[in-house]
Image (cartoon, grey):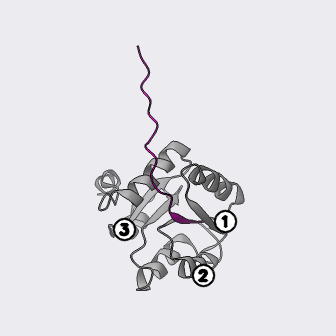
Amino acid sequence: MRKENLSLPKLPGKKIITIDDELPIRSLIRHTLRQDDHKVFEAGDGRAGLEIIRRELPDLVVLDFVMPVMNGAETLRAIRSDPRIAHIPVLLLTGVKDAEKLAPLLQDSRSDFLDKPFLVETLRARVRKMLYSPGATPDKLFMKAAS
């Protein structure tokens, strides 16, 4: 059997901020997204992340759910309540399996989620989908499973 080339076509890089309190996770995300020529900014908590978002106006936010100082839910609410940045899509990274906690955060079509731990290939595909496929979120499968 012949193996098919599953590499993705090259698309222009975008500005992305990753907000996570775990440095190894931020480093993994940075390394993964730079492979697709994205410019990656980093913050260790939601408060610092909001400052960078407001300054850089990124194309996408990759946001951890559980963090000190300002958690992912609080950060996402702050993003959606600020007219300058409310349009920015947010990929929420979470190990939380509680549908009641996550479902309200994912009602907005500009938000999606990815379970932790994740495969870097899955992260790249989800980021690509959110950046280059308008209207592709939220994750319909999760919303069905949560009901």
Residue 41 picture location, percent across and down: 62, 67
Residue 16 belongs to magenta span:
yes
Highlighted range, magenta:
1-19
Q: Quadrant of the N terminus?
A: top left
Can residue 119 be seen here? Answer: no
In this view, the mark in front (1 or 3): 3
Pick the front one: 131 or 78: 131
C-alpha gap between disc 1 and disc 2: 15 Å
Residue 14 picture location, percent across and down: 50, 62
Badge 2 marks a residue whose secondary structure is: helix
Q: Which is more N-terminal, label 3 or label 1?
A: 1
Q: Quadrant of the C terminus?
A: bottom left
Q: Badge 1 is on which residue?
A: 21
Q: Badge 3 is on which residue?
A: 110
Find residue 85 and report its image quarter: bottom left
Q: Badge 2 is on which residue?
A: 51
